[in-house]
Image: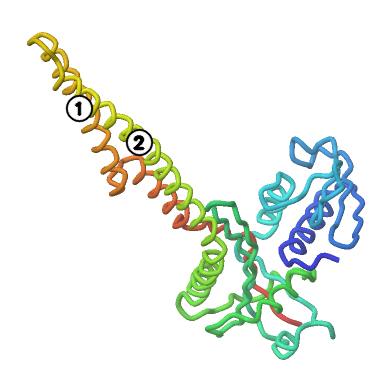
Amino acid sequence: MIDDSLDGEIDGLITGFLLASGVQYRRFSTDGSIRFEISPSERLPDDWCGGGNAVIGEARNLEDAEPLHLGHALVQAAVAEAREATPPGMRVAWALDRGAPPELIDRKGQRGRLILVRIRYDGFERVDRLIPIAVGEGDDSPMAISSARWLLDHPPYDRPELPDIYFEGDVVEDLLEELVFTDQIEVAGDEQRPFERKLEQVEQYVEDQLMVLRRRLSAARESLRAAEDRRDAALGADLRSQAESRVRGIQEEVDGIEGEVARLETRDDADYQRWRQHVQERRDKPPEVTRILDVEFVLE
């Protein structure tokens, strides 16, 4: 059995897509994974027209099956099909049974709106999250997510004759915005460690550069002292002039290395600042929010 809610939603998405597309397949459920053996079909994405095997969940020891994720071609095709099949304003009904959450049973006869969004984070690692939100008509807060997931897990039937549902102001959009904001906070916690690790790598690179420069500086200073000794011991104007020229050349090298060391020690370095900014921007990049499903419903 698949415990992870995202895996369960991908399972439902793929199953619905294959059924809606008339594609022949076999589905096997084992502990920790679900396996699909998909027959060839022109209705599948290009790379899958010849069919193939796919797996959701634990994919170890399944070298002949591709793991499914939200970026996979099959999942993308299933999302596109679901969005086309549920145009804006679509109206449906759910028949509640005894297994429905008490919150839904208590709302029998009530209308509402169900929205499924995909929130994609392109931070240090791509993270895709599918989150449903169900709002009852006249409510200013969403139902429990378990209620929304129950609706997604159970097929509705069309009710195009339902009248328009009224929500005060932008309450649904405000709830979606709050949902995305709350999810960002949760994901930001997961991103903190990779963020710190990237910053540590940038700092370590600078420290490595400093170590090399300090070694060069130490060797240059030794060369400078030796050149000064030779200059001071030189006999004759020509030899002394040559030695002085050598001292000036080495001194310029020392000054240059000291400047590079000071610049890196104070982090006044264009490369360093660009790398830090890049790391920060990757962490702060806003997520991409895609509305996959948006239906009005009545509970019956």
User: On the image, numbered disc 1 is attached to which residue?
Assistant: 252
- Circle 2 Cα neighbour tier, 10 Å, few/some/many (<14 / 14–19 / ≥20): some
* 257 is higher (above) or lower (below) than 89: above
Label whose residue precedes the other's in the sequence (2 or 1): 2
* 219 is higher (above) or lower (below) than 177: above
Three-letter code for the amino acid on which mark 1 is drawn = Glu
Nearer to us in this view, 243 or 126: 243
Task: Residue lying at the far bottom in this picture: please name it.
Answer: 106
Left or right, residue 151 beside residue 55:
left
User: On the image, numbered disc 2 is attached to which residue?
Assistant: 213
* 300 is higher (above) or lower (below) than 264: below
Three-letter code for the amino acid on which mark 2 is drawn = Leu
* 102 is higher (above) or lower (below) than 284: below
Classify the position of the N terminus by image quarter: bottom right
- Circle 1 Cα neighbour tier, 10 Å, few/some/many (<14 / 14–19 / ≥20): few
Task: Give how far across and how far down residue 70 sits, in percent.
Answer: 68, 53
Task: Give how far across and how far down residue 97 sits, in percent.
Answer: 83, 82
Nearer to us in this view, 10 or 98: 10
- Point 58% across, 60% down: residue: 119
